[in-house]
Amino acid sequence: MPRFAANISLLFTEYPLLDRPSAAADAGFGAVEMQFPYDTPAADLARATERAGIGFALFNLPVGDLLSGGPGLAAIAGREGQFRAAVAEAKLYVQALKPGAVNVLAGWPPVEIEYDRADCLGALAGNLRYAAGAMAPLGARVVTEPINTVDRPRSLISTSRAALDVLDQAGHDNLGLQYDVYHMTLMEGGVPEALPRLMPRIGHIQFADVPGRHEPGTGDIDFTAVFAAIDAAGYAGWVGAEYAPSGKTVDTLGWLRAFR
């Protein structure tokens, strides 16, 4: 079965942040991941994961104003300097936490501002190339993630094909696809069939069930088939549980006991 990581931005929120790695280890996870670790000193997070005896799988690069409704940094021409500052900040956390990958969110330009898609994709490709070069000496792969247009109607990158196209445009060996089973089920379907084809390009995998974005077993996805396809394709990286628990986290982990 895959090697599972717990996204402690969403899971184990019943505990203080620095206690979540130990809670994840006690539950049977081999690593943790986070969305944005930057409000917590990197040294504190490193001590928490070391104390838990658990690895760190992934986190996102800083995104500027993206979470407050702005266009973010990665795909907006003219914000390259801000993006490079975000890479510099992320490098400090990579050095401390030693994740396998860092994710660059392309973003979703707001409706009230019109951006040229080709310009956005060109800016994104250049920024991905820069981040990949900066992270390569630290052993962290840079990935980018397609986000579904059901939840985020203006997602710049919303399909695996679109993500691969921009990765090809960026043209760096230290780049890969972050494949989220939740997003790609909504956008493309056929996840078990797609995984063998995409696996050579995949740098990280995440999952949640559809609909609802809760734990496996609450929706329609056949996770037995998904996890079997991951194994059959020879994927050796972390598979991140990035879901909104439908109850207390420990009460939603029947899938982990079944599949680990």
Image (cartoon, rainbow, N blue to C red):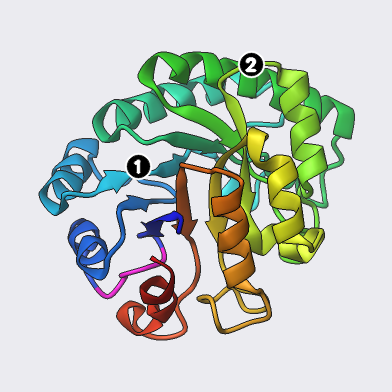
Q: Is residue 8 visible?
A: yes
Q: Quadrant of the N terminus?
A: bottom left
- Badge 2, how many Cα within 10 Å: few under 14, some, many 20+? some
Is 128 placed left or right of 193 in the picture? left
Residue 239 in picture, x, y percent from top left = 48, 53
Q: Mark 2 or 1, which is nearer the eye?
A: 2
Identify residue for label 2.
172
Is tag 2's residue or tag 1's residue first in the polypeptide sequence? 1
Tally the marks. Answer: 2
Judging from the image, what secondary structure is the residue with disc 1 in?
A: loop
Please give the name of the residue rendered at 41% of the width and 76% of the height, measured from the top-left corner.
258
For residue 193, side relative to residue 38 (left or right): right
Identify residue for label 1: 38
Residue lying at 53% horizontally and 43% vertically, measured from the top left: 235
Q: Height in image: 5 above or below 101?
A: below
Residue depicted at 37% across the width and 19% down the height: 138
Q: Nearer the viewer, residue 234 or 96?
A: 234
Pinpoint residue 145: horizontal percent, then vertical percent. Answer: 64, 44
Residue 33 is situated, as x and y percent measured from the top left of the image, at 38, 50
Q: On residue 30, which mark appears?
A: none
- The span picked out in magenta is 10-14
Q: Is residue 234 magenta?
A: no
Instruction: Identify the secondary structure beneath mark 2.
Output: loop
Residue 72 image-quadrant placement: top right
Q: Amino acid at mark 2?
A: His
Q: Tell me, yes or no, if residue 77 can be seen here.
A: no
**Residue name at image x 72 percent, y 23 percent:** 125
Horizontal side, residue 229 vs residue 99: left or right: right
Q: Residues within 10 Å of mark 1 (few under 14, many from 20)?
A: some
User: Residue 29, relative to residue 198: is it above or below?
Assistant: below
For badge 1, the amino acid type reads Tyr
Above or below 234: residue 140:
above
